[in-house]
Amino acid sequence: MNGPTGTTPSRVIVVGSGPTGLLLAGDLAAAGVPVTLLEKRPHRISNLSRAFVLHARALEQLDARGLADDLEALGNPLTRLNLFDGLTLDLGALPSRFRHVLVIPQYEVEKVLEHRAAAVGVAFRYESEVTGLSQDADGVTVHVAGGEDLRAEYVVGTDGMRSAVREAVGLPFPGRSAIRSVVLADVLLDEKPESLITAGAVGDAFAFLAPFGDGYHRVICWHRGRDVPDHEPVGLDEVREITRSALGRDFGMHDARWMSRFHSDERQAPRYRVGRVFLAGDAAHVHTPAGGQGMNTGLQDAANLSWKLAAVLHGHAAPGLLDTYQSERHPVGRSVLRSSGAIVRLAMAKGWQLPVRTVLMAVLARLAPLRARVTGQVTGVGYRYPAPRGAHPLAGTRVPDLALAGGGRLYEALRGGRFVLVTPGAHDPGEGRADRLAVAHWASGRGTTLLVRPDGYAAWAAEDAGAADIETALAAHVG
């Protein structure tokens, strides 16, 4: 797949074929929007990715696309997330169909998303490096290495921390290196770890182990005293030494098939949109790997932006809808930077910081609402979006997987990429909007009328709503 798979001119160009770009491009194509995905690398799924978990909210988004069950079959569920110093997040009480974190390498997620994107008609262009772009009132011209220019109405940069799209629109990427000289290695182990995910920190050392599923384990480790450049070679003895310092043993690691070194940054673009150009995933925000929130946050960026682009391009919404991508997702990105950074700093506390950490952990252990808030942030289910003043309390909230009349459930109803109107009555107020609205009914007989966006958040809700109220809401949100 070195060239486009279709001949229809693209209305959107997505740059970068990681999980964020693949989900976004697949959503747009499934909605009938011609889209081209540009990737500077050759066509291959790399096993060198750093992400290893899917949290509940990302799994819900994948469930709304019919993909979660396939990934669940490939990964391993973990109902308790052990962070450090006895801090454990119990996921068994999550208000979600997915009461666990799924341990699965990023490349498995990419395979599933790429297959779906190809099936719905995304035009893939590999070995196509973006060298710049220019935009005007009608669209964006993307300059590709070799002298080729491509044209689209909108461009989305999902091309990672060193985003060519972000640089082309002149956006800064303020922040700093939070952890330097992090060591990665893929190794075989003589001793099987007791837990699916093993993580720990002692003194100046931190280590993390997770399985690939093919017999190998990924080791991510760091020692505060080893601040060397990323290009400095890594030896297996160094990996063993840091792991022993952090975890007490090295599990008999041997036969490394790959080792590398990198630094972990905390950065966020001040804006996710410049005119007709958007940023998502690591192109918009990067943070430490603590809590495994990176890939998950990018997938949720894509889910938020894709339906809005499709609605605007199909003429069902005014272009102003696209401004809500910034107002909804930028605060979430900022929160993830703070929470992942806090986890790392607490894990690596030393000296006078240790008593402070002990007190914080004691408070967290005693206060169930605080634990629930932390769990909601890490898993993504605790975020809500701004709602107009005076709106129903449900407006802007993430909607869980509701049971619907007839034995169905909400996230199955969302698989058409449409809004879902959940009503207490048997009438169907969706006439004339079947291409963008599904109508369902409560299994419980609840009296609330609830309009759920394609990304699973509540757009509008009302108690005892009449036909006129519902029509006004549908005209405002669905078009």
Image (spheres, rainbow, N blue to C red):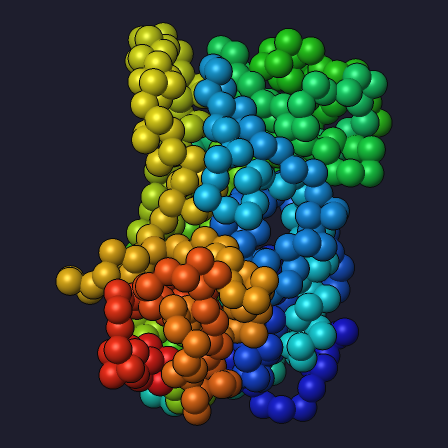
Residue 317 appears in the rendering: no
Left/right placement of residue 471 relative to residue 246 reads: left
State the residue at coordinates (72%, 24%): 235
Left/right placement of residue 469 relative to residue 415 reads: left
Q: Choose between 257 and 325: the one closer to the eye.
A: 325
Left/right placement of residue 260 relative to residue 178 reads: right
Q: Choose between 37 and 469: the one closer to the eye.
A: 469
Residue 312 found in image quarter: bottom left
Image coordinates of residue 133 in percent, x first then y, are 46, 76
Image coordinates of residue 190 in percent, x first then y, are 83, 18
Image coordinates of residue 152 in percent, x first then y, are 50, 84
State the residue at coordinates (67%, 77%): 120
Query: Quarter holding the N terminus?
Result: bottom right
Query: Quarter holding the C terminus?
Result: bottom left
For residue 248, above or below residue 58: above
State the residue at coordinates (69%, 65%): 114
Image coordinates of residue 9 in percent, x first then y, are 58, 90
Residue 370 found in image quarter: top left
Check the image and name the residue furthest to the left. 390
Residue 30 appears in the rendering: yes
State the residue at coordinates (78%, 38%): 213
Q: Choose between 466 and 450: the one closer to the eye.
A: 466
Residue 25 found in image quarter: bottom right
